[in-house]
Amino acid sequence: MSQQADPSAVRPSTDRTVVVGAGLSGLIAARDLGRAGKRVLVVDKGRSVGGRLATRRIGDAVLDHGAQFFTTRSSEFIADVQLWQNAGIINEWCRGFEDPADGYPRYCTNGGMNQLAKYLAREFEGLTLDGEPLVTVVTRHRVQSIVPVGDSFTLIYEGGSRDVDLASNVIVTSPVPQTLDILDAGGIALDPAIADDVRSIRYHAVIGLLATVDGSPDLGPAGALQTPDGPTFSFVADNAAKGASPLPAVTFHASHERSESLWSLSDEEILAELRPSAEQILGSVTIQDVQVKKWRYAGPVTPWPDRSLTVATSPGHLVLAGDAFGGPKVEGAYLSGRAAASAVLAATA
Ligand SMILES: Cc1cc2nc3c(=O)[nH]c(=O)nc-3n(C[C@H](O)[C@H](O)[C@H](O)COP(=O)(O)OP(=O)(O)OC[C@H]3O[C@@H](n4cnc5c(N)ncnc54)[C@H](O)[C@@H]3O)c2cc1C
């Protein structure tokens, strides 16, 4: 149902882009726009920036529970990864999980993947115009709808948790089903020529176990096991082995098939199903504390063929981005953020 903005709550119009989502794609889009001298507001429903670059603490242990590592293929991403490595933010974890390894570098973030997002957000402090910050980040605010009103878009937040915001352009980086909810609520219709294809973008789910343990498990030379077709877990990693955690702490990601089959169960039931396999992998190492983490939209099954998708050009540009567009990985999210920023910059040049 279409939603109307309350004019009394509307802030003064500004020439700025709102980026919905402070995952990697949103942060990179905001960075590129800010570097080009554009004003940007980034809003995210989460408690912190990062999205699926997600890290959780259990006691003194630090565990990545979304993306575990990333690879590099494109020259743009390689250039930034080199800078982040030089800045001491990321490190090369290993060159493969098989024995022998395949030789391609796998990177991860010191102190947990979420630290890369925090590093990118810190860069915004240096982007100013006339002494004012160009890029502002607001967390804990869920965008409910985007409504074209007059010569701008109006963003309305769930439960009126924040006054509405105006934007001349909007980049939306949430997973596509969540993005469609926002567009539908604002009465923004997709071009019929692409609507069915966009609505058919599906994601696979992932269920994870996050376990603190009483010693270093034997998970091979890299401290991780990758078995994409494994019956229970597709990836198991000791967060200490990759420099995320000061203490051994293991992330188990259930395979896509297993995650789907367990999805509707309670955390207790999921634990009962998965814990025996986790204990078998750990051998003599004992689980101390364990938590369940569910990702409904872990990764797109069938990504869009282009790196971003402009769904409206009036009253401004409304661009969809995220790993469903750039490709289903960290690098894809990065490339999509860059493409979305380029689309807005081209429209405002
Ligand atoms: C379990 C798991 C394991 C993975 N492993 C790997 C890996 O090893 N290597 C790899 O390369 N990739 C991996 N990935 C994929 C990788 O994490 C993603 O491709 C990438 O992080 C996606 O970034 P994004 O910016 O597109 O989306 P996200 O990081 O999901 O960012 C979208 C943001 O939008 C916000 N949002 C959503 N709706 C709203 C709303 N209504 N209002 C405001 N904000 C909203 C969310 O809070 C989120 O922060 C993994 C993902 C998961 C879940």
Image (cartoon, rainbow, N blue to C red):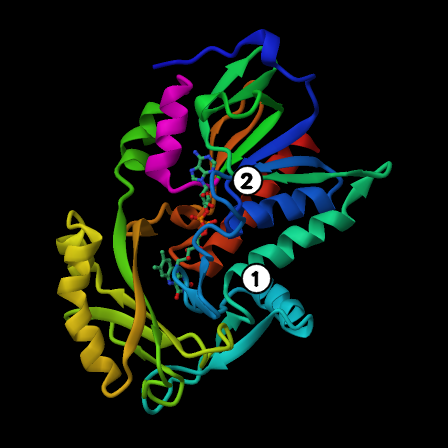
Asked whether the beta carbons under mark 2 and mark 1 sit within 8 Å of each other, the answer is no
Visible residue check, residue 288: yes
Q: Amino acid at mark 2?
A: Thr
Q: Which residues are magenta?
A: 173-189
Q: Going from the N terminus, do you reach mark 2 or mark 1 first?
A: 1
Residue 235 in which image quadrant: bottom left
Residue 251 in which image quadrant: bottom left
Separation of residues labelled 2 and 1 (CA atoms): 16 Å
Numbered badge on residue 115: 1
Q: Residue at x 33, y 28 (%)?
A: 193
State yes or no: residue 183 in magenta. yes
Name the one closer to the observer, 24 or 310.
24
Q: Residue at x 22, y 81 (%)?
A: 281
According to the picture, the residue beneath numbered tag 2 turns out to be: 139
Image position of 252 with respect to 175: above or below: below
Per the image, label 2 sits on a secondary structure element best described as loop
Visible residue check, residue 71: no
Name the one closer to the observer, 127 or 150.
127
Q: Residue 189: where, in percent of width, then height?
A: 38, 20
Q: Residue at x 57, y 61 (%)?
A: 116
Report the side of 295 relative to 131 (left or right): left
